[in-house]
Amino acid sequence: MTRGVSALWTNHTLRAITLATTLGEAGIGALPVAAALLAQNYGSASLAGMLVALFAVGALVGSLAYARYPVADHLPELRVVVLLAGVGIPLLLLPATTGALTGSALFVVSGLSYGPLLIALLTNRERQSPADAHIQVFALAAGLRLTGAAAGAAVAGWFTTHGAGWVADGVALSQILAALLGIALMGGIRPLLVQR
C-alpha cells in the first residue's frame, strides 16, 4: 500500500482531485440526514427514503446521459470540479422549499451531476495512477471517500438540533467548497483546461 500512498501524495493532479472529492463525499454522507429532516418539514417522515432514492435516480439518469454524450471526456479534472458545484448548487435551495414536490425535484437535479462526477473521478484515477500502484490507488482513494462520507454523517448528526436548513446547507456547501478546493489545489482554472 505504500506505493499507493506515494502515488496519491506525489502526483499533483491525483492528490488534488482525491482531496476535493473526499471533502465532497462528506456532504454526500450527510445527505440522508438532511433528507430525513426535510421530510419532517414536508410533513411526511417516510418521504426521507424517497428523497435519497430520487437523488440516486438523478445520478443514474446523469450517468446514462453522459455515456451517450461524453462532454469534455479528455478533461476529467475540469468535469470533477464543475460537477461538484453542480451537485451542491441545487441543494442550496432546499432550505427555502416548503413543498415536497420542489424538494424532490432539487434532489433529482443534484443527482444529475453526481453520476457523471463519479465517472470523471474514476477517469482521473485511471489516467493518473501509475501502473505498478493502480489497485492500491483505487483502494486507498475509495477508502478516503468512505471515511469522508462517514465523517459527514457524524457531523450532520451533531447539527440535527439546528434543523433541516443547517444540514442541507452544510451538504450543499461541502460540494461547492470541494470544487473550490480542487481548483485551488490544481493551481487555478487554467490547468484544468489542459489535457493531461
Image (cartoon, helix red, strand yellow):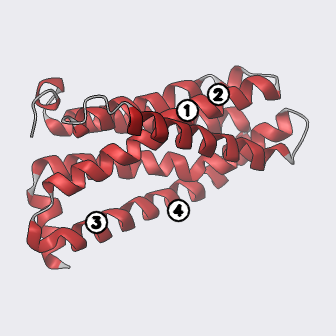
Asked if residue 173 shows in the view, the reply is no
Which of the two discs, 1 and 4, labels the residue nearer the N terminus?
A: 1
Relative to 33, residue 110 above or below = above
CA separation, marks 4 and 3?
A: 18 Å
The residue that mark 1 highlights is 110
Q: Nearer the viewer, residue 94 or 79?
A: 79
Which of the two discs, 1 and 3, labels the residue nearer the N terminus?
A: 1
The kind of residue on which mark 2 rests is Leu
Q: Identify the element where label 4 is drawn.
A: helix
The residue that mark 4 highlights is 150
Q: Residue at x 10, y 68 (%)?
A: 131
**Nearest to viewer (mark 4 / mark 3):** 3
Q: Position of residue 56 (x, y in %)?
A: 60, 46
Q: Image check: 120 left or right of 125?
A: right
The kind of residue on which mark 4 rests is Ala
**Nearest to viewer (mark 2 / mark 4):** 2
Whether pointer 1 and pointer 2 mark residues with C-beta atoms closer than 8 Å, the reply is: yes
The residue that mark 3 highlights is 138
The residue that mark 2 highlights is 106
Mark 2: few/some/many CA within 10 Å (<14, 14-19, 20+):
many
